[in-house]
Image (cartoon, rainbow, N blue to C red):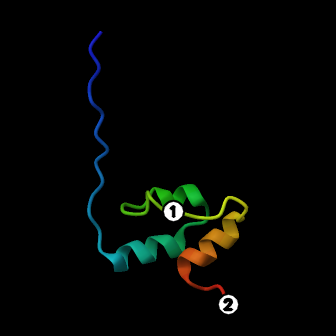
Amino acid sequence: MSKKKHEKKTKEISDEEAQKLVSKAKTISEVLAIPGMEEVYFHEDMTDEELLESLLGTRH
């Protein structure tokens, strides 16, 4: 049985577009689905809300 190599096709988007998508995202999986956001590092004990706030730069 031969395995086909599955390549993830991510389109390149601008930072501005990515920022708009991040601000619309409601869950972490939505953020990670955004091209270029696959490698987001965060604290394991952060809630989804805290992580989204930190990604959006709205934490004080």
Name the residue: 36% across, 60% down: 35
Residue at 43% across, 57% down: 38
Relative image position of residue 25 (x, y in whole percent) = 55, 67
Residue 32 horizontal/vertical position (percent): 49, 58
Give the answer, above or below, for where 44 lies relative to 55.
above
What is the three-letter code of the residue carrying label 2?
A: His
Q: Nearer the viewer, residue 42 or 6?
A: 42
Name the element at disc 1.
helix
Quadrant in which the C terminus appears: bottom right
Residue at the image position 28 percent from the left and 39 percent from the top = 7
Q: What is the quadrant of residue 20 in the picture? A: bottom left
Kindly indicate whether the residue at mark 1 contacts the one at mark 2 (C-beta within 8 angstroms).
Answer: no
Query: For the residue marked with disc 1, what is the amino acid?
Result: Val
Q: Residue at x 45, y 70 (%)?
A: 21
Q: Is residue 4 left or right of residue 42?
A: left
Residue 46 in the image, given as x and y percentages of width and height: 70, 65
